[in-house]
Amino acid sequence: MLILMALCASIYCTSCESHKEHKKLETKFLVTSPIKMDTSITKDYVCQIRSIRHIELRALERGYLQDIFVDEGQFVKKGQLMFKIMPLLYNAELQKAEAEAEFAKIEYLNTKSLADRNIVAPNELALTKAKYDKAKAALSLAQIHLGFTDIKAPFSGIMDRFHKRPGSLVDEGDLLTDLSDNSKMWVYYNVPEAEYLDYRLNLKKDSSLMKVNLLMANNKMFDQTGVVETIEADFNNQTGNIAFRATFPNPDRLLRHGETGNVVVRVDLKDALIIPQKATFEVLDKKYVYVVDKDNKIQSRIITIGAEMSDLFVIDSGLDEGDKILLEGLRLVRNNDKINYEFKEPKEVISHLRLHAE
């Protein structure tokens, strides 16, 4: 009886396995091919935003800060009076210098009159002329020192916070505030060595400068386009990167010194080999696809990804345009399995993805 039951169970299991194998063989898998086409990708680089001119305004003379004629965050025009340091001492020095210059002038004119009549020697005239020139130089210096008590905007820009308040005693060189010219912004971002070389080689073929966009911190795109105008001289040995500088117009003064964001660079790819991302699988950080051979057997093949887009991969190596790759059901098969499949044109596959290649 036991032998009979075991025999029946064995027959049943064999039948089930045969049924499963038959069902597996009847399953049709979707297969497609890589496609070559012109497309473009975008690359993002973390960036730092700097004003085209950003300077510290410091006191040029020692004294009490008498007046402040502007406010923090205010836009000031070139030449506009911003700070005044109490000028009483410098006014007195100017008056003294004026008096000494006038005295030296009178002395020189009297000596010149005598020299013209050969009453005094030419050396004495030269001496009084030197004294007069020295007095005029001292007067000019006193005027400059007095002028330093009025601190004016060296260019049009936006004021930063104040570091001194009216009535404060300031020493020569004390920081009063910062001034930023935000009419244009310099945006710095770091580029790997390989991408730098690609940029330089392409620049020789196309004389036009590379245009970039700016993704701001609020995840919105800045409405002006920037141009890469310069590259730093040296690579960073620790990171292997080099800094690029893009210049962005800032007509509405939206961008401010010290902001951060992401530079977005569009890269055009010609005859790029493209496959859907869902046709790949990963093993130990390496990407694979299943390639269908002439006997309808699938073989796993390692591929190298050149670039990534939403739903798509650009292939650097591992596949050719005519290869057939498994599109769906990757987890239902194993290496060397023989499959039945339905071929789907790559253009039709890509058209159903969320992102259409351009």
Image (tube, rainbow, N blue to C red):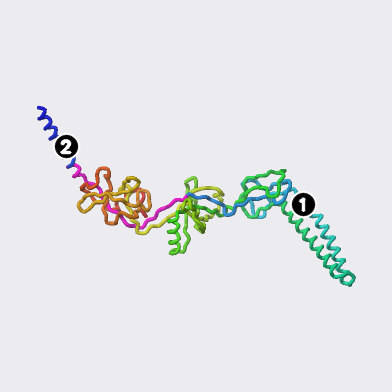
> What is the span of residues highlighted in magenta in the rendered image?
22-45
Residue 16 numbered tag: 2
* Residue 96 locus on image (x, y percent): 82, 55
Residue 23 lies in the magenta-colored region: yes
Q: Is residue 352 above or below residue 116?
A: above
Tell me which residue sits at (38%, 57%) in the image.
Answer: 269
What amino acid type should be assigned to the residue bearing mark 2? Cys
Task: Please report whichever mark, 1 or 2, sits nearer to the chain's N-terminal start.
Answer: 2
Q: Quadrant of the C terminus?
A: bottom left
Disc 1 target residue: 90
| Label 1 Cα crowd, 10 Å radius (few <14 / some 14-19 / many 20+) | many
Residue 128 lies in the magenta-colored region: no
Q: Can residue 225 be seen? A: no
Q: Quadrant of the N terminus?
A: top left
Q: Can residue 71 be seen? A: yes
Give the distance between the C-alpha atoms of the residues marked 1 and 2, in whole angstroms. Answer: 107 Å
What amino acid type should be assigned to the residue bearing mark 1? Tyr
